[in-house]
């Protein structure tokens, strides 16, 4: 689907692979110039190169979203490079798979990246969007932002927090032409879930746990993000859009 984003500028965090890379490629495929960001420089440069090879325009900037100064510099780079910022996908996140999130350091890291990172991004992006008269922000939450996960207090709390921030931003900037939404992916096959999927039994189990009988693809999340940013979603704000093959329907 080409949304005709020519002349528009999109920023994607956590875009070295997985969902963020798919969104960056999709924005570029619709004509937007893209600021690709991550802490994995090799993957980020590769995403930008993939966009360039496909005829699009992109630049990579390293940014640890847990560092407020780095986020400020990232948004400034978008404006410096392309003159504006129309869309932002605040997607960087960690899962802490296997780690005990009741440990202080693991808990603190979750909060810093998954929650504070989204807040730092939103406040810098909104400042630019307010000055230019509008924009659209999509935050990556999770189905664990809507339902609890008994194994992961940090992931569950931060993803619920992302939905809270999304609703806050939607209300705060509703009259300023900035729409703020979230996507809530179910289990998606990405580098994040790769360690689990290396075990064929686990892959079978995860496929069978989803009512549609399979995990999702990163491109299916990117589709939702682009739609939320497009004029097709012009009256949609503050919405946590579930893309989960039916997992939370039960
Ligand atoms: P991924 O691990 O491929 O992507 C996450 C990206 O964030 C990586 O490229 C990583 O380098 C980057 N990152 C980590 N810490 C960072 C930091 N401090 N600053 C900037 N970038 C940082 O995994 P995936 O699946 O593409 O995840 C993207 C988002 O989707 C995450 O927020 C995740 O929580 C969420 N999600 C993923 C699901 C899945 O099943 N894969 C399900 C629900 C939500």
Image: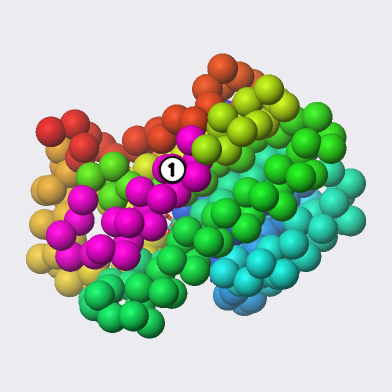
Q: Is residue 70 above or below residue 214?
A: below
Picture residue at 78% right of the left edge, 36% below the top: 130
- The image quadrant where one finds ligand 1 is bottom left
**Count of numbered circles on the image:** 1
Residue 148 visible to an observer of this rendering: yes
Q: Who is closer to the viewer here, 158 or 196?
A: 158
Could you say where residue 237 lies in the image, as x and y percent from the top left? 53, 27
Please say whether residue 225 is one of the residues in the magenta stretch. Answer: no
Q: Who is closer to the viewer here, 144 or 206?
A: 144
Picture residue at 41% right of the left edge, 74% below the top: 108
**Where the N terminus falls, by quadrant?**
top right
Q: Is residue 139 above or below residue 231?
A: below
Q: Who is closer to the viewer here, 250 or 36?
A: 250
Picture residue at 85% right of the left edge, 51% below the top: 79
The region drawn magenta spans 148-167
Could you say where residue 87 lies in the image, as x and y percent from the top left? 68, 40
Q: Which residue is mark 1?
A: 164
Picture residue at 62% right of the left edge, 58% below the top: 120
Label 1 neighbourhood size at 10 Å, few (<14), some (14-19), many (20+)? some
Q: Who is closer to the viewer here, 204 or 139?
A: 139
What secondary structure prevails in the magenta region? Answer: helix
Secondary structure beneath dot 1 equals: helix
């Amino acid at each position: 689907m080409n949304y005709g984003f020519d002349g528009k500028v999109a920023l994607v965090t956590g875009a070295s692979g997985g969902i963020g890379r798919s969104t960056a490629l999709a924005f570029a495929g619709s004509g937007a110039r893209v600021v690709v960001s991550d802490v994995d420089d090799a993957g980020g440069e590769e995403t930008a190169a993939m966009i360039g090879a496909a005829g699009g325009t992109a630049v990579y900037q390293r940014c640890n979203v847990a560092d407020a100064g780095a986020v400020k510099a990232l948004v400034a780079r978008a404006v410096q490079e392309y003159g504006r910022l129309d869309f932002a996908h605040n997607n960087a996140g960690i899962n802490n798979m296997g780690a005990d999130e009741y440990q202080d350091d693991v808990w603190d890291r979750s909060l810093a990246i998954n929650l504070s990172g989204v807040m730092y991004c939103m406040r810098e992006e909104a400042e630019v969007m307010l000055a230019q008269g509008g924009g659209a922000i999509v935050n990556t939450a999770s189905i664990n932002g809507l339902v609890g996960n008994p194994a992961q207090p940090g992931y569950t709390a931060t993803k619920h927090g992302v939905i809270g921030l999304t609703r806050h931003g939607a209300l705060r900037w509703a009259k300023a032409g900035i729409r703020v939404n979230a996507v809530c992916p179910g289990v998606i096959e990405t580098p994040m879930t790769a360690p689990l999927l290396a075990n064929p039994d686990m892959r079978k189990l995860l496929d069978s746990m989803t009512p549609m009988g399979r995990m999702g693809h990163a491109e299916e999340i990117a589709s939702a993000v682009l739609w939320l940013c497009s004029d097709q979603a012009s009256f949609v704000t503050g919405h946590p859009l579930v893309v989960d093959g039916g997992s939370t329907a039960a």
